Amino acid sequence: MPRTFRLAALALLLLPLAARADDGPPKLKFDEVKEVAPGVFFRYSSIGPDGSNIPFGGSNNIWVVFEDYVLVFDANFPKEAAAVIAAVKKTTDKPIRYVVDSHHHGDHAYGNAVFAKEGATVVAQAHCARLLRVNGPKEFAEAGRGPTGRKDVAASSLKVPSLSFDDKLVFDDDKGQRAECHFLGHAHTAGDAFLYLPRHKVLCTGDACVNGAYNFMGHSDSASWVRVMERAQGLDVKLVLPGHGAPAGKDLLEKQKRYFVELRRQVRQAIDAGKPFDDVVAAVNLPWYKEWTTIAPTKANVQHVYDELTGRVAPWDLAEEFGVTEGPTPTRATPEGKTVRRVVVPNVMPARLAELKRLAPEVEFVPVKTAEDAARAAADADAVIGFCTPEILHAGKNLRWIHIAHAGVDKELFPDLVKSDVVVTNAQRLHGPNTADQAFALLLALTRGVREVLPGAVADAQWRLPKGQQQELRGKTMVVVGLGGIGTQVSKRAWAFGMRVLAVDPKEMDKPDHVLALHKPEKLKELLPRADVVVLACPLTAETRGLIGKEQLETMKKTAYVINVARGGVVDTEALTAALKKGRIAGAGLDATDPEPLPDGHPLWKMSNVVVTPHLGGQSAGAADRLWRLWRENVRRFVAGEPLLCVVDKAKGY
């Protein structure tokens, strides 16, 4: 949720000679400060293309003067931070209360401690704050170490943000000054923050948009960067203040986007033509880019896009958007780590098989069509992807890894596999968006009466109104059982509908902003009487089998709905059927049933307050793409001896 800071005191400082964004981009010399809009100042830091003799002056800086305080955008390096503070004091006598890091790189965040000594609170987007907290100490130390290290960093200390935001954070006052911190997605880094000044139509971009050949892509995702620039273009902007380079008009956003669009297209064309990397570099030709920046696209940028498109870098969204994590697995640093020679894979398209061969040319990939074929091919294989049977395990004497292509593994975890040293991975968390959509399709079909009026839903299909009153979701309470990938996505959608979300999960985790309260499973019985909707999104284990039965259903409201997008066995089908017949609850939406498929003639098929779908939640083009990218990334990790993603705890069953 957006947060707003309102501080009322003296009148807003408005210098009479301030420029207006409408007047066009100001012309500045390096280290010059100019008021680009009333109460908005820009400091232009020196920078030049690689190989130039222009000294690097860190990032550009912007500060906004409010009624009784100053907000600075980007902390710069410690040395430059001191210069910025001195410059701020020449423009106003108001104290610096906030410094916002546009991202975690040193030239934008390592001056935090200098600002903190001035009494400033350090602000950052949540991903940026996490990167500074987790990776920052090591990276900060390295930046100040050795003869090439920065002396100002060595003499300073790392200050991590104490105030973070997810999507939006607003600062304003009673005189009309307003600054909005926006997170538009993963661009230059995972935690890029934009500072938008709507009154002045000014956008401060950090390194998500630069004016010149200053794009470092080492922590970027170029496809997502394009989408971020499109979102930025949706803002009403006349003046862009980039992280590096001179101020410009809104057309700079289009230039930045165009660079990544055309770079990706040309690299993709070269890859598809089968060219080796050096020929890919030579094939990239962007004359307009050289006219803009004075240099051709760097080899490092071409390499990064090439690595993205060929699976050589981890897809950013798996961790950041879906919460996929590494698990304990044999690596080359452990005694179990061995050279990978043979991997059995599903019978994929030739283009995808070619991707795997580019990724690991020394590995033999063996495509198979069936589990029986996989068992025959597993005899001397190091891994099997997409199939998991006792026959495969027993045949695979050298087997170290099995990947299951879906999230639920209750049917695959047979005793010998659980006891073995074979690492099992699955598609946990990656079916969240599609399955959450399915949950709401079921829920809305019930609450809006769709089940009763669709042609074919009743024997005499015709124009008719549903018998009951349609319900709206706003203000209702949803209990989400299982706050994994699916439960998280369900709760986000429920929050967007204006619902109160109460979640249940056994794992220790931070409560998401979109969840009102997070409880342990033993609290479920206390929560059920409060629920208007219960969504089941938990794995099927010994603890969750029959979780919703006669006793639980009897505690629920007569107006409540049960939505099951987990496994059929989580619900006692007989008890649910009886509760629905008696009107004990209002309805049920089932994408999973027990038994599955639900037999013809089963009473649930005939009930107007029940919607049954044939386990469609796992199906979508987006999910298929995520699953492919997951196991391609895991192949890369397995061959490189790195920890795998989505490792199943075989003892727990998920």
Image (cartoon, helix red, strand yellow):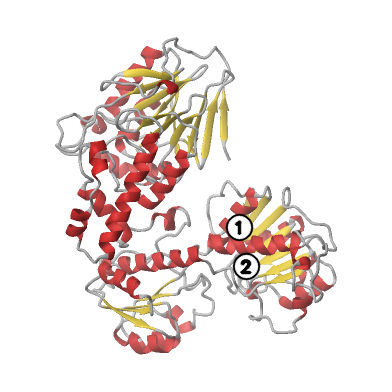
Q: CA distance from mark 2 to mark 1?
A: 10 Å
Q: Quadrant of residue 557?
A: bottom right
Task: Check disc 2 and give the amino acid type.
Answer: Val
Determine whether 654 is above or below 46 in the image.
below
| Residue contact at pointers 2 and 1, CB within 8 angstroms | yes
The residue drawn where x is 43% and y is 80% is 387
Residue at mark 2? 565
Q: Residues within 10 Å of mark 2 (few under 14, many from 20)?
A: many
User: Crowding near pointer 1: few (<14 within 10 Å), some, many (20+)?
Assistant: many
> Where residue 206 appears, x then y in whole percent?
37, 35
In this picture, residue 175 sits left or right of residue 393: right
Residue found 64% across the figure and 63% down from its top: 439
| Left or right: where 479 falls relative to 146 | right
Q: Position of residue 479 (x, y in %)?
A: 68, 57
- Choose the circle earlier in sequence order: 2 or 1: 1
Name the kind of residue labelled 1 in the image: Val
- Can you say whether 556 is above or below 264 in the image? below
Q: In this orientation, does residue 142 appear?
A: no
**Which one is nearer the viewer's eye here, 152 or 101?**
101
Looking at the rendered structure, the number of numbered marks drawn on it comes to 2
Is 452 or 128 nearer to us in this picture?
452
- Tag 1 residue: 490
Which secondary structure, mark 2? loop
Mark sitting on residue 77: none
Residue 367 picture location, percent across and down:
35, 81
Q: Quadrant of the N terminus?
A: top right
Residue at 21% x, 32% y is 48
